[in-house]
Image (cartoon, coloured by chain):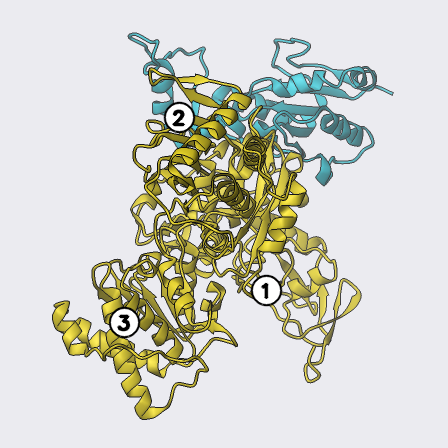
Chain colours: A yellow, B cyan
Amino acid sequence: MKKDIQPVKITIDGQEVLVKPELTILQAARQNGIPIPTLCHHPALSERGGCRMCVVEVDGAPRLAASCVTPVRDGMQVVTVNERIVETRRIILEFLFAERNHNCMFCPQSGDCELQDLAYELQMDHLTVPQSFHEFPVDITSDTIGLDHNRCILCGRCVRACEEISGCYVLNFQNRGPDTLIGFDLNAMREDSACTSCGACLQVCPTGALYNRYRAHYAVKGHPKDLQTIQTVCPLCGLLCPTVSTVRDNHLLKIDGVIPAGDGQPEGGQLCHAGRFEVLKNSGRRLLHPMVKKADGSWAETSWESALDLTVDRLNTVRDAQGGNAVVGLISSLSSNEEIISFRDLMVKGWETGQIETLENSGFQNIYRIRQDKGPAFKEVSWKKIAEADFILALGAVTRDRQPVVGSMIRKRIIRDNVRSAGIGPGDFLYPYRTHHIQVKNGDELLLIKAVLSEAIKVMKKTAPAPGTGKISEQTEPVRVKDIVKRLQLDAKAESALDEIIRDYVDSANPLIVVGEDVAAQKDLSGLRDLMNLALLKGLYGNDRLRLIVLKPDGNSMGAYKLLHLSDEKKRAPAIPKGGLILLEQDPFQDKVNLKAPGDLDFLAVISPYWPDGLADSAHVLIPKPLWMEADGTCTGLDGCEIAFRPKMLDAPDGINPSWQTLMALAARADIHLGYGSWDELRQKAQREIQPDGPVEKRR
Amino acid sequence: MKKPKLATVWCEACAGCHMSFLDLDEALVDILSRVELTVSPITDFKDYAFPQVDVGIVEGGVGNKENREVIEHLRQQCRFLIAWGDCAVFGGINTLRNWLPKDDVLRCAYVKTAGTVNGIIPAHEDIPQLLDKVLPVNAVVAVDGYIPGCPPAPEALAYCLKELLAGRLPVLPADMIHFD
């Protein structure tokens, strides 16, 4: 506590407490262990003071005060419980129950309803007011989020969550009085609205009005006290959002964001639709036994031993006949660091392979090639710093699909803090909040960047030298805005937008450039170099960070890049592949998109949790593995700084070995020494090898 | 001292509350040694012209004219009236039909069901007419005590009877209130 801010002394239920003056009565009471019931209050959200459940008596005043919005004052006398207060709260509760249909079939069994908890707590054993029996609509147009207005108590938590946690501003109140409803957009159905399905609303809903349509039956899976919860991180896109998974009887029932208890600075429990819902959607047929392709092309079950033996024998044959560089290894970049390390070591040491690639097939690493070739090896800024930027330039970055939370952070920064922003690319994903958007087709973003750079150098030289410590390599030749405008056939509006983007960038003190994976993957290295120069023009962020945030295609893309491309393990020049080993992860719907089967191979073995539809034709051996949620592992965050351990949540189906075990068994058969023989040794190896790029940034 | 008299009635409900009453098991012996159970679905008295009783207990919501007459009569004949179970306290599962017009409900049950051919809605002076809406007991007559629950716990009823025998109006403690 600062010296100049004196604590105030208040009395709550006869107990004198010293509290910070900026607190509300509710916060002061809860900090001191004095319970006050609430409904519209939520630790991750701003206060509304709407439900009046938290009323208390202040200084004996005739009118009760809502403690969640009443600040403390020195000498205040607060009473939280007496007959009048409890009666008032109970009457409020009765009104809520009487207004809509709360004869709910789920809550009594699941206990997952704050309204019901309060009814018990306040001994609401009957209603003294008549029930309305008015019917309200139900919106189940979405397959993720259901909205049953009959269960809604209009506490507005979802409205605030949509605004404050996800920055979507899709939910709000509509109509007036008893007709008031929570509405998407302007009275749209959920499916037709701009909702991004992040699910923040259903996590904060105190009743069952907004509910998860995947596994809605979790409600009848038992009382929360019977369920197991596992704190972990979401490994899907590299942001490593902390999650709480609810599990019962080896079934994943739901995934929630982490909302810190108490009244600390909340991070709100934000997740995206992929992290909250897609994971529950187990599409695809699980691969449960090792399979081998018979001569007639059909598949037969086989034993682990024979599948592993066959794989080693056939890959040895390819290496002996064609050389190791004809053996290709492909691994999903959703795999854990431990899987990537053991896969790489097996391929390099076992078959002297020439090629280990990730499946994402995006080439976002191009941008790092420049970092490696020219100048110091800069590190990029953590995406968490978007919350501090005063100008955000998004290039091609369509974050809605891959990293929706990054898009949401940018939106929040724009809307809440009036930060100027611009998008350049094929998709206007910040519409309508961004200051400018210039529509260009994919691949042309960097042409505009060249023009921005030339102009910015000109302007800044006039006004001030680049304050950064980084060296700007010469732009090959200055590019004039006019030429680019003409070449890309931009209209006058886009031209003036470009002028303003240049001015905004030059005038900003702390700009950040968000680079979509499609831009980072562009083959035009001079364009990427100019992008880096543009970032350098405003100096480094902190001591060593380039003002770039490079979005990457998959959950552990950064880990895979570091372990496969930056590692010291010797690889030989690739030849035309004749044999291969592929390690898949996750659902086919993820991997299939990125998968390019490496043509006709003499031999291909696939290690996969699901039946690999796209590969089954060219494969010869299929070996099952657990899903990521069925195995321990670490993954490296988008910024390369955070390395998170995600514990196993579920047991794998019987008879399926962890993939590290499979890879080690292959190594043993190929008679090679990986240098580790157990999970613990592999983890130690991973810990030694994976060095974070810097300290983990705090989330905001 | 004469034993206090008890009457229980079964209006629009599933009889689950009375099942729960029987679930008191050996505690029943103790309770029945202290009170006299008069009219009740358990004793199977058919005569609804009640005698005067001390405690009347209602299972079920008020859904038809007969229910209403029974409840009004019971209210006159008893000193303390207890609403027992979610149907009597809140209206319960029967209120499902309160969101629909009465005619739709009858047509749905007697005409539109999949297995019905040429169905007709039964109408006879002996058949009590359905009310427009199912109501909780306290929407029709004054109620002295409430035991919610579907079904209410046997212990909750035992607790209330003991409170009444001790001369107190029963109010369930928070940990005994349950809607399921």
Q: Residue at x 43, y 37 (%)?
A: A582
Mark toward the viewer: 3 or 1: 3
* Viewer-proximal residue among A268 and A329: A329
Label 3 sits on residue: A449
Q: Chain of mark 1?
A: A
Is residue A216 rendered to the left or right of residue A192? right
Q: Taking the image as drawn, is residue A369 in sight?
A: yes
Quarter-of-image position of residue B76: top right
Q: Which residue is mark 1?
A: A265
Per the image, the residue denoted by label 2 is A620
* Mark toward the viewer: 2 or 3: 2
Query: x and y percent of residue A541 in the render?
Result: 47, 75
Give neighbour class at mark 3: few <14, some 14-19, many 20+ (Cα, 10 Å): many
Three-letter code, disc 3: Ile
Mark 3–mark 1 distance (CA, rounded to whole Å) = 37 Å
Which residue occupies the foreground of this view, A262 or B71?
A262
First of labels 2, 3 by sequence position? 3
User: In this rendering, which labeled residue sits more in front, label 1 or label 2?
Assistant: 2
Q: Earlier in the sequence, mark 1 or mark 2?
A: 1
- Asked if marks 2 and 3 touch (Cβ < 8 Å), the reply is no
**Horizontal and vertical percent position of residue A509:** 42, 81
Q: Amino acid at mark 2?
A: His
